[in-house]
Amino acid sequence: MTYKTRTTLARILALALVIGISVGVYFLGDQAEKLKPYGYAGVFVIVLLSYATVILPAPGIAVVFAMGGSGFLHPAGIALAAGAGAALGELTGYLAGFSGQAVVARVKFYNQVTVLMQKYGSLPIVLLSVIPNPVFDIVGIAAGALKIPVLKFLFWCWIGETIKMLFLAYGGALSLGKWFCLMRGESMTDFNRIDQYLKTHLDESVAELSRLVAQPSVAAQNWGLHECAALVSEMLKARGFTVEVIATGGAPVVLGSRKGRSPKTLLFYNHYDVQPAEPLDLWDSPPFEPQVRDGMLFGRGVSDDKGHMISRLFAIDALLDADGELPCTVKFIVEGEEEVSSIHLKDFVRDHADKLTADGCIWEFGGVDHRETPMQYLGLRGICYVELSVTTAAMDVHSGTGGSIFPNAAWRLVWALASLKGPDERIRIPGFYDPIRPPSDRDRELMAALPETADDYKQRFGVDHFLNGLTGGVELRLAEVFEPTCTICGLTSGYQGPGSKTVLPAKASAKVDFRLVPDQTPAQVLKALRAHLDAEGFPDVTVAFLGGEQPARTDPDDPFIKLVTETAAPVYGQPMQLVPMVGGSGPNHPFIEYLHLPIASAGVGYPGTLAHAPNENMRLDLYIKGAQHIARILKAFGE
């Protein structure tokens, strides 16, 4: 092969490689959004300079040594080439990190790199990635002395450089890319800085959360809802959000929006209402006077749901401190009726869909299980909540007078309730099970991968057995969320004070919830319940609908779920584990039905949080981790 042919082939190869890298960077690179305004030509020039950096300073200098040793170049040419390579390397060296950074993002090495750096620190990894550079000089001199053909040596130099660059991408690009971006005057999220911000500003954030918790907002008692909505609005405005407080037939809904670097939009759903604090005598400290004890914050609403909301604002604070802007557009919808079945939210979401448009949604809750493993909850059961009541007389009657001749409201209601479900736990309402869609093979696969919960449940809740002979395993986990329920939540009738009172009750009522699974609906259950009571001879038992929601789920293989799951790894040391559905209920259906959003969970909860119970609490270590995870979600989502 002649010198001219060799030169032509080398030039064609170099040009093809530069063009290929340029196209890849233009469409796939981490800085693509910043580079696209320069067009194809601008990206081509940038990559050409970066490629020159790869060829000249390391293997390039080695090649010229080899050329000189083999007599291919005059000594003056060696000096000129080496000097030009070094100068070009000084001017364009920072661009080398660009390619490595893109590789990291595209091949999904980001999580592993971050975990390695958290474990060993950045310095040793960066050193390992740059050590091969001087080796090329030594090898080049040896190649020249051994008279190795230049093209053969050039080929092996390129192979060696490719291996080194892949190692650089895996081990050092996170730090080097950060430094190079800073040298270019560009903003790149520094998670070390973000994490440090979260740790050093924890007290300030907990103080803000405590202020929110100290504002009572009990939806069931219509207590403090407007005041709490105003406080949420104030907190969003303090972060530069455009805020609307919109009236509904009940508690107002707070909407917030702030544009970010990317037009992609992430919607956060939270609620500011809380459960009633009763029984008050079981609290170790007043429920609306939050206190920090033993690394935990105690107070009504610290976990459900005010802690989740403020931790997200905390993450936003850290991102703004690091970058001065958000990586993507962020919206909040914060309602005040979640604890009473979100009575007005379905219509609100439908009517304001234009204000809620987004590309993904982070739900109100999330956290770790009893193993400290972060969990990704992909769906919620629905609910139909009713109050059954019956009146048999105008007033309570002396039981000696009416006990044998007057109807007893309490017995009447008990018999009606007994008709709903038998000792076999089978719900006896005709047609109740007809719409149910059984769990899929994928659901069973995900449930089988989850840890055993039987012993944990027995110990934590003090039960000694499970229904229908279940003892544990995947069948227990499937039954927990994929079977509908009929639960008597409370009974009221007659005298319930201390001592005795011989009275025949004139009125009786019971609160009953039905947990629904796909594809049941509250409307179907209400209709079937009324028909059943009439057919069983209880037309006098009234049914008051107190609220309901349809079940809804997100595809476990949706790319948004993968993003949220994988970004948990740097924080928790492992990706999130998928749970296809949980037993609780919430208003996720209109977000999926009207907004067509994938919904993921990410938050600050853990099994001992005691939500809905006295001494509700939140662990501060998980509060920080929850904010760290949200910051990483926002950053990855913006890319």
Image (cartoon, helix red, strand yellow):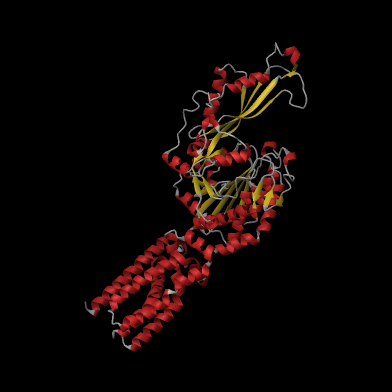
How many marks the image carries: the answer is 0
Could you tell whether 372 is left or right of 110 in the image? right
Is 212 placed above or below 570 here?
above
Q: Residue furthest top?
A: 405
76 vs 135: above or below: below
- Tell me if 146 is positioned left or right of 513 in this view: left
Asked if residue 327 lies left or right of residue 41, the reply is: right
What residue is rendered at 50% in x and 51% in y? 565
Q: Nearer the viewer, residue 524 or 401?
A: 401
Q: Is residue 188 visible?
A: no
Quadrant in which the N terminus is drawn: bottom left
- Residue 399 image point, x, y percent: 74, 15
Relative to the observer, which residue lies in front, 87 or 147?
Answer: 147
Q: Quadrant of residue 216?
A: top right
Q: In the picture provided, is 157 more to the left or to the right than 188?
A: left
Residue 581 shows in the view: yes
Q: Within the image, what quadrant is residue 352 found in?
A: top right
Residue 392: x %, y % from top left: 68, 17
Location of residue 71 in the rendering, given as x and y in whole percent from the top left corner: 29, 86
Q: Residue at x 71, y 19 (%)?
A: 506
Question: Where is residue 25 drawn, in percent x and y?
Answer: 40, 64
Vertical arrangement, residue 198 with respect to residue 69, above or below: above
Q: Nearer the viewer, residue 428 or 607?
A: 607
